[in-house]
Image (spheres, helix red, strand yellow):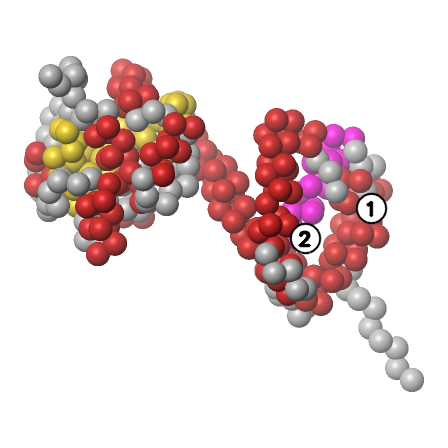
Amino acid sequence: MARPGRLGVGIIGAGKVGAVLGAALRAAEHAVVGVSAVSEASRERAETLLPGVPILEIQEIVERSELVLLAVPDDSLGELVSGLAALGAWQPGRLVAHTSGRFGVGILNPVRGAGAIPLALHPAMTFTGMSLDLTRLMDCTFGVTADAAMLPIAQALVVEMGAEPVAIAEADRTLYHAALAHSSNHMVTLVAQASQLLREIGVDAPESMLGPLLRATLENALASGEAALTGPVARGDVGTVSAHAQALREYDGGAGGDILAAYQAMARATARRAGNRGLLRPEQLTEIGEALEAEPDAPKGN
């Protein structure tokens, strides 16, 4: 016997997020009635994570569904919602949720205008599009935004997927998403840059060297916040900071390389935060700033 309150769910976008969330809702005994999938990769993903679910046209999915999950890129969301509204596709009383981190429910105003119920459900996790993501959902939070009366519905859907809902105000969605992108996406860039440098000096498996260090650093930072700050910048070791900047400048072939620019930007931010905590004196902050910008002395002529 089906559990009460089960919904017919339609997934628009069988990307890495949509297929996984569809599988999670299906595991909670909701019926996935259709999925849209254009590329070969998305079709294969749908067949793997949502076996037996028909691949349908978008408008047909909307017509069949009590909950429509829009798992499309941020820049495509507004046009998709407006286009379906122009076709009269949105139906009163239906739930329409998107998975964009950047947007709240304002972008779903055409849905609201048709009498449907807008929800924003964004998983604060990076996805592979494989079944292992379902396990990761158990240790994941979602940023949820909805009208006050509908917030419990959004929260319940997240809980049913095994995750933890956190309410995010409409006006705060962009900052919320910036925080996640800054931490996750830029971490990948930093790791890639560090790995590149290590490979260049002959380290065959930089991941083995970086893995324990980065895992310990992340755990310390999450547990202790800025109290976990360490290293030459936080210690005010100006000579080391200067040596780093000079070496990276030479490696990047001048001031135009992305590794030097990233090191300088993060070192400045680290210095400011260390200064705010009283770890660095004002003159040390000045010296670190100068060390980061100093060009090597030009060779003297004969």
Q: Is residue 299 magenta?
A: no
Checking the image for residue 37, the label placed there is none
Residue 15 location (% of width, % of height):
28, 46
Q: Please state if 277 lies on the left or on the right of 146 as rendered.
A: right
Name which residue lies at 40% across and 33% down: 136
| CA separation in Å, label 2 and label 1 | 15 Å
Could you tell me if the residues under marks 2 and 1 are in contact, i.e. CB atoms within 8 Å? no
Q: For the stretch drawn in magenta, what is the main secondary structure?
A: helix
- Which residue, given by chain and number where applicable, does mark 1 sit on? 237
Question: How many residues crowd around disc 2 within 10 Å: few (fewer than 14), some, or many (20 or more)?
Answer: many
Residue span colored magenta: 263-278
Q: Is residue 288 visible?
A: yes
- Which residue, given by chain and number where applicable, does mark 2 sit on? 264
Q: Please state if 219 lies on the left or on the right of 288 as rendered.
A: left
Name which residue lies at 82% across and 46% down: 237
Q: Amino acid at mark 1?
A: Asp
Along the viewing direction, whichever of 300 and 229 lies nearer the viewer: 229
**Above or below 159: residue 38:** below
Q: Amino acid at mark 2?
A: Gln
Residue 54 location (% of width, % of height):
11, 42
Tell me the element at label 2: helix
Name which residue lies at 38% across and 27% down: 138
Q: Is residue 290 visible?
A: no
Marks 2 and 1: which is nearer the front? 1
Residue 289 location (% of width, % of height):
76, 50
Residue 255 location (% of width, % of height):
66, 65
Q: Quadrant of the N terminus?
A: top left
- Name the residue at the bottom extreme: 302
The tag earlier along the polypeptide, 2 or 1, is 1
Q: Quadrant of the C terminus?
A: bottom right
**Above or below 285: residue 24:** above
